[in-house]
Structures are given as structure tokens and as C-alpha cells.
Image (tube, rainbow, N blue to C red):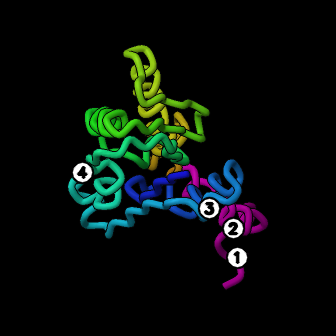
């Protein structure tokens, strides 16, 4: 069993991936684990060459390995769709299927175009999910949090609303 983890998506931290893998694949830690933990500067650069463990996983060899590669989400495997398709090609060349736990999709090593298209859709959906739920983008979330905080502060002052400024205790 082979497992790949990375922190390339800010909303898909390694801890969450490990929890998903623990739930779906008990004993995954005993297998081959490839882990790319990039510092913020490298994550910001979005360089596929920075994913050293992924490169090790995909390194060409004469051995054909049929062990599937398990990922909690396909979004942690690549930066872009073209990068993801390159990963699928690399896995195919090694004879390794890809199992995406969040969508339950398995891409065989000799995937036909329809299976590759399904995997690409799963990747794009996972990338959207990693950014947050629809309507829950960063600005929306922070606006809602600030609004709720303002409402809480207003509730504290509600008893004083009917008072004139001379009656207000200071």
C-alpha cells in the first residue's frame, strides 16, 4: 500500500488527510508513505518541482508495481489540472492505480479517456471543495464573523439604548 500526503492546499492540512486515511484505511502507516510538507514560500510558488516525495513516487523504473496509491483527496496531489494529468500519466507508466478516498474514485493504471476525464472532474471538484463551500469564500466568512461579533457587542449595550445621554452611567 502506498499513500501520498501533502500540504499544498491550505484547507486540506496533513492532519485532516491523516484522519481521513485512518478512517478509510486502518494500518496505512505501515505501508510506503510519501509526504511533502512545504514551507509557506514554496506553497506560494506552486512549483511542481518542489514536491520531492511526489517525484520519488513517480520516478520511472523498470519494475511494474501494481500497488495502488491512496490519497485523501486528489487536490493534494497536484497544483493544476495539467499537473494532475501528468501525475496520472506517471502513475500509468509505473502500472499504479490511483485511489481517491474523498470521492471514492479509483483510476486504473491503464485508464481510458472516460476514466481520465472522471478523475479530472474529481480533481477540479476537490480543488473547489478545498477552497470552501459555495458561498463560503474568505470574504463571506470573515464578514459573517465580524457581523456576529458586532451583534454580540450590541446585545451588551441594549439596556442602555432607551436612556438619554445624561442618564447613561459613566
Tell me the quarter of the picture where residue 123 sits.
top left
Q: Residue at x 37, y 15 (%)?
A: 113
* Coordinates of residue 84 in the picture (x, y in percent): 33, 37
Q: Answer with mark 4 or mark 3, whichever residue precedes in sequence.
A: 4
Tell me the quarter of the picture where residue 106 sits.
top right
Q: Which of 151 and 90 is in front in this view?
A: 90
Residue 98: tell me if it is visible: yes
Q: Nearer the viewer, residue 47 or 151?
A: 47
Residue contact between numbered discs 1 and 2, judged by CB atoms under 8 Å:
yes
Residue contact between numbered discs 4 and 3, judged by CB atoms under 8 Å:
no
Instruction: Report crowding for label 1: few under 14, some 14 to 19, many 20 or more residues within 10 A (C-alpha).
Output: few
Q: Mark 3 points at which residue?
A: 149
Q: Give the range drawn in magenta.
A: 144-170
Above or below, 96 relative to 17: above
Whole-Å distance between the Cαs marked 3 and 1?
Answer: 23 Å
Q: Mark 4 points at which residue?
A: 48
Whole-Å distance between the Cαs marked 4 and 3?
Answer: 41 Å
Q: Which of 73 and 4 is in front in this view?
A: 4
Q: Which of 25 and 153 is in front in this view?
A: 25
Tell whether 120 sits left or right of 46: right
Above or below, 14 relative to 166: above
Q: Answer with mark 4 or mark 2, whichever residue precedes in sequence.
A: 4
Q: Mark 2 points at which residue?
A: 164
Q: Which residue is drawn at 55% across and 58% down?
A: 146
Identify the secondary structure beneath mark 2. Answer: loop
Q: Mark 1 points at which residue?
A: 168
* Coordinates of residue 48 in the picture (x, y in percent): 24, 51
Amino acid at each position: 500500500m502506498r499513500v501520498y500526503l501533502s500540504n499544498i492546499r491550505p484547507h486540506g492540512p496533513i492532519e485532516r488527510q491523516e484522519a481521513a486515511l485512518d478512517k478509510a484505511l486502518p494500518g496505512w502507516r505501515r505501508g510506503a508513505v510519501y509526504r511533502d510538507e512545504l514551507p509557506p514560500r514554496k506553497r506560494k510558488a506552486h512549483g511542481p518541482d518542489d514536491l520531492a516525495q511526489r517525484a520519488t513516487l513517480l520516478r520511472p523504473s523498470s519494475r511494474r508495481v501494481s500497488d495502488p496509491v491512496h490519497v485523501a483527496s486528489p487536490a493534494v496531489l497536484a497544483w493544476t489540472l495539467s499537473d494532475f494529468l501528468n501525475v496520472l500519466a506517471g502513475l500509468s507508466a509505473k502500472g499504479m492505480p490511483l485511489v481517491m478516498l474523498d470521492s471514492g474514485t479509483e483510476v486504473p493504471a491503464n485508464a481510458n479517456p472516460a476514466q481520465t476525464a472522471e478523475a479530472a472532474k474529481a480533481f477540479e471538484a476537490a480543488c473547489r471543495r478545498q477552497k470552501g463551500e459555495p458561498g463560503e469564500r474568505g470574504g463571506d466568512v470573515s464578514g459573517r464573523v465580524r457581523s456576529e461579533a458586532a451583534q454580540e457587542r450590541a446585545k451588551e449595550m441594549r439596556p442602555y439604548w432607551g436612556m438619554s445621554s445624561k442618564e447613561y452611567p459613566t
